[in-house]
Image: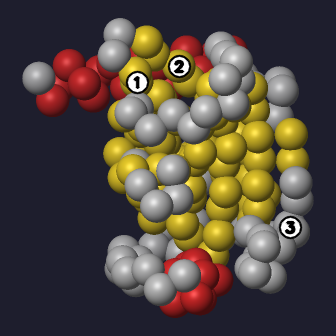
Amino acid sequence: MKTNFSLALLVAFAIALAAGVASAQHTHGHGAGASGMKMDTREVRVEGLKVTFQIMANPEHRKMLKEMKMKDDIEAGTTHNVTVALTDLSTQAPITDAAVSMKVVDPKGADQVKSLKYEGAMKSYDAYFNLPAKGRYELLVLIRQGERRTTAGVYYDLK
Protein backbone atom coordinates (compact mmCIF):
# COMPACT_ATOMS: atom_id res chain seq x y z
CA MET A 1 0.00 0.00 0.00
CA LYS A 2 2.87 2.36 0.82
CA THR A 3 4.35 1.62 -2.61
CA ASN A 4 1.06 2.56 -4.28
CA PHE A 5 0.92 5.81 -2.29
CA SER A 6 4.54 6.62 -3.17
CA LEU A 7 3.93 5.88 -6.83
CA ALA A 8 0.76 8.00 -6.85
CA LEU A 9 2.63 10.85 -5.13
CA LEU A 10 5.48 10.69 -7.65
CA VAL A 11 3.06 10.61 -10.59
CA ALA A 12 1.16 13.60 -9.22
CA PHE A 13 4.36 15.57 -8.71
CA ALA A 14 5.57 14.63 -12.21
CA ILE A 15 2.30 15.95 -13.66
CA ALA A 16 2.68 19.16 -11.66
CA LEU A 17 6.25 19.56 -12.89
CA ALA A 18 5.27 18.88 -16.50
CA ALA A 19 2.57 21.50 -16.32
CA GLY A 20 4.95 23.92 -14.62
CA VAL A 21 4.44 25.70 -11.37
CA ALA A 22 1.00 27.27 -11.20
CA SER A 23 0.89 30.39 -13.28
CA ALA A 24 -1.40 32.12 -10.80
CA GLN A 25 1.39 32.43 -8.23
CA HIS A 26 1.03 35.58 -6.19
CA THR A 27 3.92 36.69 -4.01
CA HIS A 28 3.79 38.72 -0.83
CA GLY A 29 7.58 38.84 -0.56
CA HIS A 30 9.83 39.06 2.46
CA GLY A 31 7.29 40.79 4.64
CA ALA A 32 6.59 40.48 8.29
CA GLY A 33 3.68 38.70 9.83
CA ALA A 34 1.22 40.23 12.27
CA SER A 35 3.73 40.06 15.12
CA GLY A 36 6.71 41.33 13.13
CA MET A 37 7.89 37.85 12.12
CA LYS A 38 9.79 37.46 8.87
CA MET A 39 7.74 35.14 6.69
CA ASP A 40 7.46 34.71 2.94
CA THR A 41 3.96 34.07 1.62
CA ARG A 42 2.96 32.75 -1.78
CA GLU A 43 -0.59 32.05 -3.00
CA VAL A 44 -1.92 30.04 -5.90
CA ARG A 45 -5.47 29.39 -7.00
CA VAL A 46 -6.14 26.00 -8.51
CA GLU A 47 -9.29 23.92 -9.05
CA GLY A 48 -11.46 26.02 -6.73
CA LEU A 49 -8.85 26.21 -3.97
CA LYS A 50 -6.64 28.98 -2.68
CA VAL A 51 -3.38 27.40 -1.55
CA THR A 52 -1.28 29.67 0.66
CA PHE A 53 2.36 28.74 1.28
CA GLN A 54 4.11 30.39 4.24
CA ILE A 55 7.86 29.88 4.61
CA MET A 56 9.66 30.86 7.80
CA ALA A 57 13.21 30.26 9.03
CA ASN A 58 13.27 28.13 12.18
CA PRO A 59 14.60 30.86 14.53
CA GLU A 60 11.67 33.09 13.54
CA HIS A 61 9.26 30.17 13.78
CA ARG A 62 10.52 29.31 17.28
CA LYS A 63 9.96 32.95 18.32
CA MET A 64 6.40 32.83 16.93
CA LEU A 65 5.64 29.55 18.73
CA LYS A 66 6.87 31.04 22.00
CA GLU A 67 4.79 34.21 21.56
CA MET A 68 1.69 32.12 20.81
CA LYS A 69 2.43 29.80 23.76
CA MET A 70 2.51 26.81 21.43
CA LYS A 71 4.70 23.72 21.72
CA ASP A 72 8.19 24.12 20.24
CA ASP A 73 8.36 21.02 18.05
CA ILE A 74 11.00 22.12 15.55
CA GLU A 75 12.50 19.07 13.86
CA ALA A 76 16.27 18.66 14.33
CA GLY A 77 18.32 19.01 11.15
CA THR A 78 15.88 21.41 9.49
CA THR A 79 16.16 25.11 8.70
CA HIS A 80 12.62 26.20 7.74
CA ASN A 81 8.98 25.65 8.56
CA VAL A 82 6.60 25.52 5.62
CA THR A 83 2.91 26.02 6.38
CA VAL A 84 0.13 25.50 3.86
CA ALA A 85 -3.37 26.92 4.36
CA LEU A 86 -6.20 25.72 2.11
CA THR A 87 -9.31 27.77 1.41
CA ASP A 88 -12.38 26.81 -0.62
CA LEU A 89 -12.77 29.71 -3.05
CA SER A 90 -16.54 29.35 -3.36
CA THR A 91 -17.27 29.46 0.38
CA GLN A 92 -14.05 31.10 1.69
CA ALA A 93 -14.04 28.34 4.34
CA PRO A 94 -10.75 26.79 5.44
CA ILE A 95 -10.26 23.18 4.35
CA THR A 96 -9.49 21.14 7.43
CA ASP A 97 -10.03 17.55 6.26
CA ALA A 98 -7.36 17.08 3.60
CA ALA A 99 -4.25 14.93 3.55
CA VAL A 100 -1.40 17.09 2.28
CA SER A 101 2.05 15.95 1.12
CA MET A 102 4.85 18.25 0.06
CA LYS A 103 7.90 17.84 -2.12
CA VAL A 104 10.66 20.45 -1.84
CA VAL A 105 13.22 20.48 -4.65
CA ASP A 106 16.46 22.31 -3.85
CA PRO A 107 18.56 24.38 -6.31
CA LYS A 108 20.67 21.31 -7.18
CA GLY A 109 17.63 19.12 -7.91
CA ALA A 110 17.65 17.04 -4.71
CA ASP A 111 14.26 16.64 -3.08
CA GLN A 112 12.58 16.05 0.25
CA VAL A 113 9.06 14.60 0.50
CA LYS A 114 6.99 14.79 3.68
CA SER A 115 3.39 14.52 4.83
CA LEU A 116 2.23 17.78 6.38
CA LYS A 117 0.71 17.72 9.86
CA TYR A 118 -2.64 19.45 10.41
CA GLU A 119 -2.55 22.19 13.07
CA GLY A 120 -6.12 22.73 14.25
CA ALA A 121 -5.39 25.96 16.12
CA MET A 122 -3.96 27.49 12.96
CA LYS A 123 -6.30 25.76 10.45
CA SER A 124 -3.23 24.87 8.39
CA TYR A 125 -0.81 22.07 7.56
CA ASP A 126 2.93 22.22 8.17
CA ALA A 127 6.29 20.44 8.23
CA TYR A 128 9.95 21.31 8.67
CA PHE A 129 12.40 21.13 5.78
CA ASN A 130 16.13 21.62 5.32
CA LEU A 131 16.81 24.55 2.98
CA PRO A 132 20.54 24.95 3.63
CA ALA A 133 21.76 26.88 0.58
CA LYS A 134 20.82 30.10 -1.14
CA GLY A 135 18.97 29.68 -4.40
CA ARG A 136 15.60 28.80 -5.90
CA TYR A 137 13.51 26.06 -4.28
CA GLU A 138 10.38 24.53 -5.74
CA LEU A 139 7.59 23.67 -3.29
CA LEU A 140 4.93 21.27 -4.57
CA VAL A 141 1.90 19.94 -2.72
CA LEU A 142 -0.44 17.06 -3.36
CA ILE A 143 -3.81 17.66 -1.67
CA ARG A 144 -6.11 14.68 -1.17
CA GLN A 145 -9.75 15.12 -0.17
CA GLY A 146 -11.58 11.81 -0.53
CA GLU A 147 -11.29 10.92 -4.22
CA ARG A 148 -10.22 14.44 -5.24
CA ARG A 149 -6.53 15.03 -5.95
CA THR A 150 -5.15 18.53 -6.50
CA THR A 151 -1.58 19.66 -7.05
CA ALA A 152 -0.13 23.14 -6.63
CA GLY A 153 3.33 24.62 -6.44
CA VAL A 154 5.38 27.76 -6.00
CA TYR A 155 8.99 28.86 -6.18
CA TYR A 156 10.81 30.23 -3.16
CA ASP A 157 14.07 32.16 -3.55
CA LEU A 158 16.27 31.85 -0.48
CA LYS A 159 18.60 34.83 -0.34
Say which of 63 and 102 sits in front.
63
Residue that numbered label 3 is attached to: 30
Question: Position of 133 compared to 115: left or right?
Answer: right
Q: Residue at 75% of width from left, 81% of height from top?
A: 35
The earlier-in-sequence mark between 3 and 1 is 3
Cα–Cα span, label 3 and label 1: 29 Å
**In this rendering, is residue 124 above or below 69?**
above
Looking at the rendered structure, the kind of residue marked 3 is: His
Q: Residue at 51% of width from left, 50% of height from top?
A: 123
Dot 3: few (<14), some (14–19), or many (≥20) neighbours within 10 Å?
few
Q: Which mark is residue 144?
A: 1
Cα–Cα span, label 1 and label 2: 7 Å
Dot 1: few (<14), some (14–19), or many (≥20) neighbours within 10 Å?
some
Residue 14 visible here: no
**In this rendering, is residue 70 above or below 13?**
below
**Which x, y percent locates residue 132?**
58, 72
**Residue 21, quarter of the rendered image:** top right
**Residue 40, quarter of the rendered image:** bottom right
